[in-house]
Amino acid sequence: MLSKGEIEKLYQACETLLDRAILGLFYGCGLRKSEAEALNIKDINFRGRLLYVRSGKGKRRRVVPITGNVEGDLKNYYLQERIRMLRKSSDPKREKAFILNSQGGRMLGQNFWRRIRYLVLKAGIESPGRITLHSLRHSIATHLLAGGLSVEQVRDFLGHTNIESTQIYTRINSEELNSEK
């Protein structure tokens, strides 16, 4: 799990609008790798500040609220950088995918991971091997709980079926708070 300070360092290390969009999806929206890979343009409602996960784990659907900063990062990527990437592709299905790779095709997990890994190293975060795409999801869950959201609200945000899956983060949060004393 990353601290809020480490998350801030990751954002400061961003070089592109794509970098900020990737952090927005994995940290700001708490998406799983497969959910980010499958994300299409139609899945983001900028006006309503909502992101639709149409096929999450277990084929479950959910709606994720998008905060102002994340909404701005996703919109800037979409309106500026994505358009440039789109010109590089001859794939007729390219227009559906929200996040594109450098060739203009749908970005997949390995590319997401490489970019996060680069940002972690650039940010100078200690023990970079502990940071994965999924640890960004863990981090937002823990930060939301620490910020006062209920376990039920975080469960819905993450798309967990069982509250027990979400309660893992309450234990992590309690352990972290105790270690800071």
Image (spheres, rainbow, N blue to C red):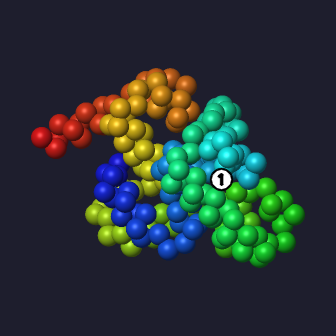
Is 118 placed above or below 164 here? below
Q: Residue at x 55, y 72 (%)?
A: 16
| Observer-nearest of 76 and 56 | 76
Please tell me whether residue 136 is drawn above or below residue 151 in the rendered image.
below
Camera-side residue of 59 and 62: 62
- What residue lies at 42% left-to-right and 70% top-to-bottom? 13
Q: Amino acid at mark 1?
A: Glu
Residue located beneath label 1 in the image: 37
Residue 81 in picture, x, y percent from top left: 66, 70
Q: Is residue 142 left or right of residue 39?
A: left
In front of the other: 11 or 128: 11
Q: Position of residue 169 (x, y in %)?
A: 37, 34
- How far across and how far down the image is residue 145, in percent? 37, 34
Q: Is residue 145 above or below residue 137?
A: above
Q: Quadrant of the C terminus?
A: top left
Q: Position of residue 137 (x, y in %)?
A: 46, 45
